Structure formats: structure tokens, C-alpha cells
Amino acid sequence: MMESSSFQGLMTVEAVEKALNRSRASVYRYANTDPEVLNPPYDPQRLNPELRVNKEDVLLFHPNEVARFAQDVLGIKQVTIEVQQPAETVTHELLKAILSELQSIHQLLKQQK
């Protein structure tokens, strides 16, 4: 069973490590990365991360790519992906409260016109 504990449905290295039952070092060895190239071309024999904007960005993997790699390269026959919604964070709750307040202000301004 593969789980995604990540950013907007993408899997972190830790989530891939857990899903594939491999060490962190193994996941980095599998990953299609190159110190000289920010986003190397797709390699069907490697685990291809999502595109990054700069080299300091965290490696993130799409669950379908992890499943493809597990089946095609590692030979894991049955792969199930379970994508879970991330838990609400304090930041998310604060942003929702700000949005609600802005919507209230917007309504008041519309009524005054």
C-alpha cells in the first residue's frame, strides 16, 4: 500500500521511502537527479521527480510515477496508491479566516455603493 503524505498530493522522499519499503539512500539512488542539471530528461529506469524551480527545492514525486517505478523497475506486482488530503494546518486555518474577513469587508463595501 502506498501513501502520500505530502504537498498537494505529491510524495516527499520520506513518503516514497515508506511506500517502497526502501532506505532514504536507496530512494535518492533511484531518483532521476543530476547535480549539473536542474530537471534532467525523463528516464524510464529511474524514479522521476516533479519539475523544480531551483536546486534547493525539495524533491517531490507524483504517486503515479512512484507506482510506475515500483511496478516497471522494482518488479512489485501489486501497487496500490492511497492519496490522503493533508491535515489542516494552523496556517491554512488562518488563511481561511482572513479570506472570510475579506469577503465580509467586500460585502460591506458593495452595500455602501
Image: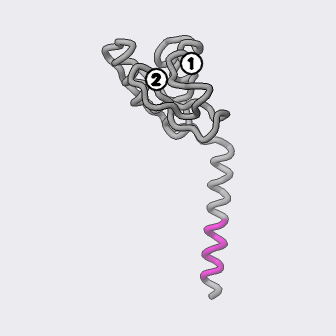
> Measured along the vertical axis of the image, is residue 97 above or below residue 47?
below
Towards the viewer: 35 or 25 = 35
Q: Residue at x 39, y 30 (%)?
A: 64
Instruction: Name which of mark 2 and mark 1 comes first in the sequence.
Output: 1
Q: Residue at x 32, y 17 (%)?
A: 78
Report which quarter residue 98 is drawn in: bottom right
Q: Quadrant of the C terminus?
A: bottom right
Q: Residue at x 51, y 22 (%)?
A: 31
Relative side of 7 to 64, left or right: right
Q: Residue at x 52, y 17 (%)?
A: 18
Numbered range of the magenta stretch: 102-110
Q: Quadrant of the N terminus?
A: top left
Is 103 one of the magenta-colored residues?
Answer: yes
In the displayed image of the protein, which residue is found farthest to the left?
77
Secondary element under disc 2, as helix, strand or loop, is loop
Disc assigned to residue 47: 2
Towards the viewer: 70 or 29 = 29
Amino acid at dot 1: Tyr
Crowd tier of the residue under label 2, counting other residues whose Cα lies within 10 Å: few below 14, some 14–19, many 20 or above: many
